[in-house]
Amino acid sequence: MIDSHCHLEQEIYKNDLDEIIQKCKTNGLRAVITSCTHPKDFKKTMDIINKYRGFVFATAGIHPLYIKEISEKEIKEYMELLRNNKDKLVGIGECGLDFHYIEEPEQRERQKQLFIKMIALARELNKPLVIHARDALEETLKILNEENAANVMLHMWGGHNLMDQVNTLGYHVSMNSIIMKSKTYGKVIKKIPIDKLMLETDSPWIAIKKVDDGYEIDNKGKNDPTTIKLIAEKIAKIKNVEFEKVWKTCSDNAVMFFNLNS
């Protein structure tokens, strides 16, 4: 299995990342895709993929939540940095729109303009896109469609009512442990073809803990990529297919999407 989206550069991993990577390998993971979402974390992300070469791969972009603290000059410089390091990246993102926390019209417009720049950069570098969308699902699809975005992964996508459009556009969806508590996200799993599905943990967030009747989200816990197996088990139940089919197919999808065999 491949964790197609996590954040290994986070400070919470500074003392035990070696242990976590070894645990990933012991638990049967083939690879981990870590996502750098802020220019300040780029060097650390590069250090991580260099240390765990061939097992940890990186995408990089600017998370839409950071729009208020990122200047246009910083955006331009960061995009040039990504161009200069394109051979070290397997994707652009996460990027996209977040209208849940960003309410000011002028900042939402800046999000949209940055999103368009990231789509253009992915096209220029021939890299797939990793998309964040919260409370802006229709707007996100509209921009992706208008900008002719290709090779799109909708990370933690909750728009079950938009799945006909997603499937028509041929986009991928990656899903994490949110499905342990949300029927809305479960509906997305039911509607996405398994050959367009990838698994993620979004570690260190959205941790899972054992309870009497199964598992639930532990908002105070520390997640890591090994919980991907629990997510695969849950998806197998939702889609009513064998666990091994989810485990292998979603892994193969990630290999192909991120071109990990090149």
Image (tube, rainbow, N blue to C red):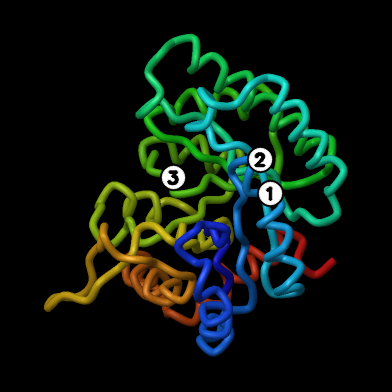
Left or right of 130? Residue 119 is right
Contact (Cβ within 8 Å) of mark 1 with mark 3:
no
What is the three-letter code of the residue carrying label 2? Pro
Q: Residue at x 51, y 23 (%)?
A: 68
Indicate which disc residue 42 carries.
1
* Kind of residue at badge 1: Phe
Q: How many labels does the image show?
A: 3
Q: At 70% across and 27% down in the image, what residue appears?
A: 74
Closer to the camera in the image, 237 or 53: 53
Amino acid type, callout 3: Trp
Residue at the (55%, 33%) spot, across then down: 96
Residue 39 image label? 2
Q: Are marks 1 and 2 in contact (CB under 8 Å)?
A: yes
Q: Which of marks 2 and 3 is in front?
A: 2
Q: Which element type, helix, strand or loop, lies under badge 2? A: helix
**Cα–Cα gap, marks 2 and 3:** 24 Å
- Mark 1: give few (<14), some (14-19) or many (20+) Cα within 10 Å: many
Residue occupying image coordinates x 45% and y 41% = 163
> Residue 50: horizontal and vertical position, in percent?
76, 68
Q: Name the residue under label 3.
A: 157
**Residue 4 in picture, x, y percent from top left:** 57, 61
Secondary structure beneath disc 1? helix
- Distance, label 1 to label 3, CA atoms, is 25 Å
